[in-house]
Structure formats: structure tokens, C-alpha cells
Amino acid sequence: MSDDGRSASPDIGRTGAIVLAGGRSARFGTDKLEARIGDRSLLDLAITAVQAVVTDVVVCTSPDGTPDVPTSVRVANDATPYDGPLAGVATGLAAMPAGVDRFLVVGADMPSLEPAVLRELLAQIGDGAEAACLVGPDGRTRPLPSAYRRDPAAQAVATLLASGERRLRALTANLATTAIPDAAWRSLDPTGGTLRDIDTPADIALD
């Protein structure tokens, strides 16, 4: 990494992000997309973070979802409601411009994503790595946020969905994945906010 915390790797070209926003919000009680921290929605905070890093953003939502997003952001609707995050990735990939070779996957309920960490995830793709994820303080890898090379990820997503798999964690398990240790990515995000997600209204009350 360079002195400013960015990866010292060469330019990685056109990049994308899939923001998963098609969940049930069952534990939250209402639609999380409308929940706000200060004067901004959870979805807006996630979009802003990835737009600082990538060239193309796709928000994947429910079949009838119409989220309020910037004009530069594409919205892709899942064919089947609540079919799981892996299906959401497939929806996002179908809507992603053809020129995007590497992409992030984040949750719409992740309001504290650190762009420097997202940039590092993308920078880890290459030299044999088809995916990259973060290791949490408990020593376990986390499925969100994560980064992928498009072609192998698209093939793996199709194969996994055909087998009945719906978990996002299965995608990194079936690709050559680099796991960034907790201590390494925490140098870019000392509070660990990148792994934070919002499950209940009480999680927002912590702000």
C-alpha cells in the first residue's frame, strides 16, 4: 500500500458495484431502504461509498422495487422476490455494463463502508485471485463487502444457483479467494465500520 492508504497496484480499469437491496427487512420491521441516519438513507450512504471507488453502480432490488437513486445508478429488479443474495448478484451482473471486469458486492444496509477498504478489495483481484473478502475480528471471513473478477464469478454464480445454492458465502468458497486479514484492512478503517450492517432500528440508534 502507498502512504495514503491506497493500493500500490496499477490501474485496474473499469469497475462496478452491485448494491444488494432486495431483502425482506424482516428484523427491521419496515423497509430498511427508507431508514435514515441523519438526513440520509441507508441506501444513499452505501451508494455514495461505492461511487467513490467504481465507475458503474447497479442497485438490485425486489421485483416491484423503485428505490430513489442518483441518475447515474442503474436499478435492476430481481425476477423472483426474496430469492437470496446470490440471485441478487446474478441480477446485478446481467445489468452491469459489458466493459466492467471487476466488481464489488455490498449491502444496501451497510452505512459505514470505507472507500479505501473497498478500493483495496478490488486491488487484490489478480495474480490468480478471482475474489477478495475481509476477515472479521473473530477470524471468520465475511461475504460482504467482497470483490470479484467478473467472468469466473458469473460462471460460479450460474452453477451455484442451478444447484439450489442461494448463500453469497458459497461464491467466495468456490473461487480462488484472497482473504484480507483484520489487522491489514483495519489500517485503512480503524473503527471497523466497513463490516457494520443494520438489522434492527436499535442499530441505527447507536449513531
Image (tube, rainbow, N blue to C red):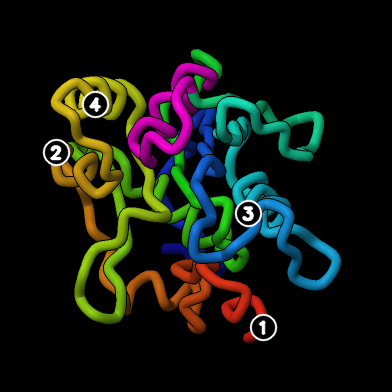
Q: Which residues are magenta?
A: 79-96
Q: Is residue 36 above or below residue 108?
A: below
Give the quadrant of residue 40.
Answer: bottom right
- The reply to whether the C-beta atoms of the residues labelled 4 and 3 are less than 8 Å apart is no
* Amino acid type assigned to the residue bearing label 4 in the image: Leu
User: How many marks can you see?
Assistant: 4
Mark 4 vs mark 2, CA separation in Å:
12 Å
Residue beneath label 2, please?
A: 174
Give the quadrant of residue 82.
Answer: top left
Percent position of residue 142, x then y:
30, 61
Residue beneath label 3, please?
A: 46
Residue beneath label 4, please?
A: 161
Q: Is residue 163 above or below residue 129?
A: above
Q: Is residue 92 above or below residue 189?
A: above
Residue pictured at 43% horizontal, 33% vertical = 88
Task: From the image, give the main secondary structure of the stretch colored magenta.
Answer: helix
Q: Nearer the viewer, residue 192 or 159?
A: 159
Q: Which label lies toward us, 2 or 1?
A: 1
Q: Is residue 91 visible?
A: yes
